[in-house]
Amino acid sequence: MGKTTIGNSNEVFDVALSNNILAILNGNSLQTYNVLNGVFLQTYNLEDFGLVNDGDNLLVWPNIGPRSPSSELILISDGGGDLAMMDFTATNQYQGNLLLASGPTSADMDAV
């Protein structure tokens, strides 16, 4: 999904659904929305996850297969190769980071 700008202040960079929680990536924050009861839950600052750029992509990592996580994760990318992992079924939803690449960036990362 490409970046969509509405006016000057509302930007939605990507959305992903995991365990009835809609993750909305906008700028340097991630908002969560419960689709069952229609309530916004929490807003996370991407800097708290060690991501230094504005959010770029959300990826759903399902829990199928022997090398998958024990529960479905959402990976948050700022295009720099370090992805924050969120598990919306866990008490501590932020699960750490997954480093895929490091070094200077030469182009946007679109797919993993």
Image: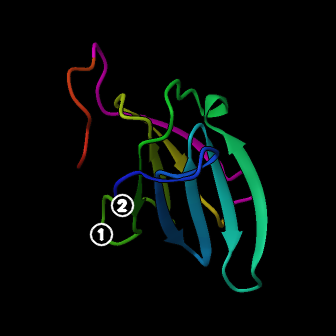
Q: Amino acid at mark 1?
A: Gly
Label 2: few (<14), some (14–19) or many (≥20) C-alpha neighbours in 10 Å: few
Residue 18 in the image, given as x and y percentages of width and height: 53, 71
Q: Residue at x 39, y 61 (%)?
A: 61
Residue 75 in sight here? yes
Q: Which residues are magenta?
A: 90-104
The residue that appears at 23% across and 49% down in the rendered structure is 111
> In front here: 21 or 72?
21
In the current view of this chain or complex, which residue is farthest to the top? 104
**Residue occupying image coordinates x 41% and y 62%:** 60
Numbered tag placed on residue 68 in the rendering = 2
Evaluate whether residue 72 shows in this view: no
Instruction: Quote the CA–CA distance across marks 2 and 1.
Output: 5 Å
Q: Secondary structure at mark 1?
A: loop
Q: Residues within 10 Å of mark 1 (few under 14, many from 20)?
A: few
Q: Position of residue 27 (x, y in %)?
A: 56, 40
Quadrant of the rendered image containing residue 63: bottom left
**Residue 87 percent across, percent down from the top left:** 59, 58
